[in-house]
Amino acid sequence: MSQQDRLFNDVWQQYFPAIARVVQSYEAIPALQEELQQDIAVAVWRSLPRFNHQSSIKTYILSIAHNRSISHVAKHVREGVSTSTDDMAIAGDECPVLDLESARKMSRLTKAMHRLPVVQRQLLGLALEGLSYDEIAEVLGITVNNVGVRLNRAKKALKDAVERS
């Protein structure tokens, strides 16, 4: 196994859960989620040799994931493909009775996220992954102050969307 193979495998294993959450925040249809994850995997594989340590590896990987996700959404909008949340399934094991309420809340939250504009989903997704305002600003190419303003608006829009559902 080459050094690039090992690096990719290590990075993919470490950040796959975060990438999966990014994918779910952009795409509701499970088959298209898989397609998007594969597209992100290829992009990560190709770009890892160019990683120059100017940011954290987490920021770098999530930046790739978000950029690919935006391209994916834009492509499907141009093609007129629906990304309805009606077909969405909650990932994970079968929910016992005690986990049912948690699963319902997660479903409502995910459906509400899909109703938001892509820019707001992107901000919320990066924030939920634990990136700082500085890191979000770096990924999106905007100022730190702008991150704060946009993130507050996105949080309010998400709260309103959840309350309407």
Image: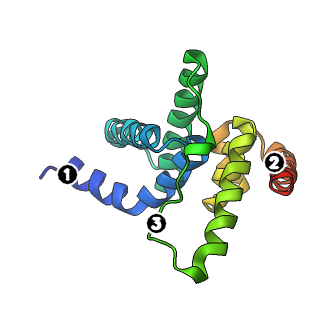
Q: Earlier in the sequence, mark 3 or mark 2?
A: 3
Q: Position of residue 103 (x, y in %)?
A: 61, 68
Which of the pair 5/38 is nearer the observer?
A: 38
Q: Position of residue 35 (x, y in %)?
A: 40, 37
Which of the pair 99/75 is nearer the observer?
A: 99
Residue behind mark 1 = 3
State the count of labels.
3
Which of the pair 54/127 is nearer the observer?
A: 127
Which residue is at the far left?
1
As helix, strand or loop, the secondary structure at mark 1 comes to helix
Residue type for callout 3: Gly
Residue behind mark 3 = 92
For the question of whether residue 54 can be seen, the reply is: no
Which residue is at the far bottom?
98
Residue type for callout 1: Gln
Cβ–Cβ under 8 Å for marks 2 and 1: no
Label for residue 154? 2
Select label 3 or label 1 by which is in front. Answer: 3
In the image, what residue occupies the spot 47% across and 48% down?
Answer: 61
Select label 3 or label 2 by which is in front. Answer: 3
In the image, what residue occupies the spot 54% across and 27% down?
Answer: 71
| Left or right of 149 in this view: 134 | left
As helix, strand or loop, the secondary structure at mark 3 comes to loop
